[in-house]
Amino acid sequence: MKRVYKVLLPLYREKEMSKEIEQEWHMDSGGLQELNYHQFGKLIFRIAHHWATHIDLGEYVELLEKVFSRITVRKVLKTTDQNILICYPTI
């Protein structure tokens, strides 16, 4: 959840972010430890609806694809001394 938050709000404060994520999680999960498929779908739709400029399916898809790629894509690089360095997308 922190990565999604960082993608959507890149200028964040750690303490505020943690508090807000906890509040949002409690609301979205109904106090449970995990989301079921239906709850997850509602959450994703709410994120898209909140952050999109227009009520438009194409814009929702584009926004969610950007969030997905920014929290999941990583690069594996070798340094000059042949160590492996894993780089996540910068936000």
Image: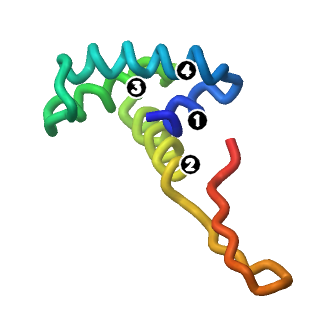
- The quarter of the picture where the N terminus appears is top left
Amino acid type, residue under disc 2 in the picture: Arg
Other residues around mark 2 within 10 Å, as few (<14) / some (14–19) / many (≥20): some
Amino acid type, residue under disc 3 in the picture: Ile
| Mark 3 secondary-structure assignment | helix
Foreground mark, 4 or 2, reads: 4
Foreground mark, 4 or 1, reads: 4
The residue that mark 4 highlights is 17
The residue that mark 3 highlights is 47
- Real-space CA distance between mark 3 and mark 2, rounded to the nearest whole angstrom: 15 Å
Disc 3 or 4, which lies upstream in sequence? 4
Picture residue at 58% right of the left edge, 63% below the top: 74
Task: Classify residue 82 as left or right of residue 36.
Answer: right
Other residues around mark 4 within 10 Å, as few (<14) / some (14–19) / many (≥20): some
The residue that mark 2 highlights is 70
Disc 4 or 2, which lies upstream in sequence? 4
The residue that mark 1 highlights is 7
Mark 3 and mark 4 in contact? Answer it, CB < 8 Å.
no
Please tell me in which quadrant of the rendered image residue 36 appears. top left
Q: Nearer the viewer, residue 42 or 61?
A: 42
- The quarter of the picture where the C terminus appears is top right
- Real-space CA distance between mark 3 and mark 1, rounded to the nearest whole angstrom: 12 Å
- Real-space CA distance between mark 1 and mark 2, rounded to the nearest whole angstrom: 7 Å
